[in-house]
Amino acid sequence: MTDLPNVTLGRTGLAVSKIGFGAMELRGPYGDWPTRVDDATTSRLLNSVLDLGINLIDTAPDYGLSEELIGKHLSRRRDEFFIATKCGCSVRATGEPFESNVHTFERPIIRAAVEQSLRRIRTDHIDIIQFHHSPSRSELEEHDAVAELVDLRDDGKVRFIGMSATLPHCYEHLDMDVFDVIQVPYSLVELEHEDFLVKASEAGVGTIARNGVARGIVSAGRDKVEAIPDGWRQQWLTNRDKFEAAGLEDLMDGASRTEFMIRYLLATPSVDSTILGTGKPQHLADNIAAASKGPLGRDAYDEARRRVAAVSGA
């Protein structure tokens, strides 16, 4: 066990670790970017997540094998972590894992996805259920989608209602005043949601940052760059370009780029927790070691943000 700090996740009252675990890398041979999943390594990885002090795990029905692997390897330790998954994802009648960019928010599909997640994760409740892919307010209202999650909450199958959001719809979500938790992409090189995070935090909403280390691209080697799917490559490389153009080396005090970005997030007052994903136990250990060094000092934080904002035009 490490000294990884916990924080209250907005109005939920949940005491979650400042670093959460993103389980998308456990999707296996599904989707546009398949990953290798070794059962023994996955067991070691997931149990290390809890052993190292992380108690928030984020996944989704359309992350391939992810939910099933969490259930297989962590169900006996269910009282040690909070599970956040998503809904609106496509559901196959067979229950077969797969990835799809198709999301619909009709009430029967939402309920079917939640029931499927409960079976896969081998649990009787989901702590945080989040709408996936940031549907607009009008789309949610068209299908009365929030009411279905309220019913599921009343049934005891979910505890808190959340949203996996992006601009521009995240402000609509906040105005709806029904979401206990909202997660958005945010990192030192992705500042676009900074204003939103401040407003959400001030409103008492639990805030989660995803892509907190820009998916590792700022320190990635050639092999990883070449493996990036075409639809993501330019955005990811732009984020790396921002980091390099900002000239942050004098502020890093020997830290790796990933460590510096993790500690930046820990120092961001409007972020309750940040989701860091990996399929490799060593990467997990490295992330926790970086977090254990604590948040960046205020001077380094402010200057790093200023330099990145300057090269980003923010």
Image (cartoon, rainbow, N blue to C red):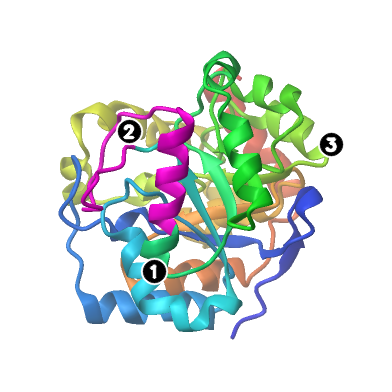
Q: Quadrant of residue 270?
A: top right
Residue placed under numbered mark 2 in the picture? 237
- How many residues crowd around disc 3 within 10 Å: few (fewer than 14), some, or many (20 or more)? few
The residue at which mark 1 appears reads as: 70
Q: Given this view, does label 2 or label 3 mark the residue nearer the observer? A: 3
Q: Is residue 97 magenta?
A: yes
Q: Amino acid at mark 1?
A: Ile
What segment carries the magenta color?
Answer: 90-117
Decide: is 14 above or below 44. above
Q: Residue at x 53, y 24 (%)?
A: 311
* Mark 2 surroundings: few (<14), some (14-19) or many (≥20) residues within 10 A: some
Residue that badge 3 annotates: 202
Q: Position of residue 242 (x, y in %)?
A: 45, 31
- Mark 3 to mark 1: distance in Å? 33 Å
Could you tell which of marks 2 and 3 lies nearer the N-terminus? 3
What residue is rendered at 75% in x and 62% in y? Answer: 7
Please tell me which of labels 1 and 2 falls first in the chain: 1
Q: Quadrant of the C terminus?
A: top right
Q: Check contact, mark 3 vs mark 1: CB within 8 A.
A: no
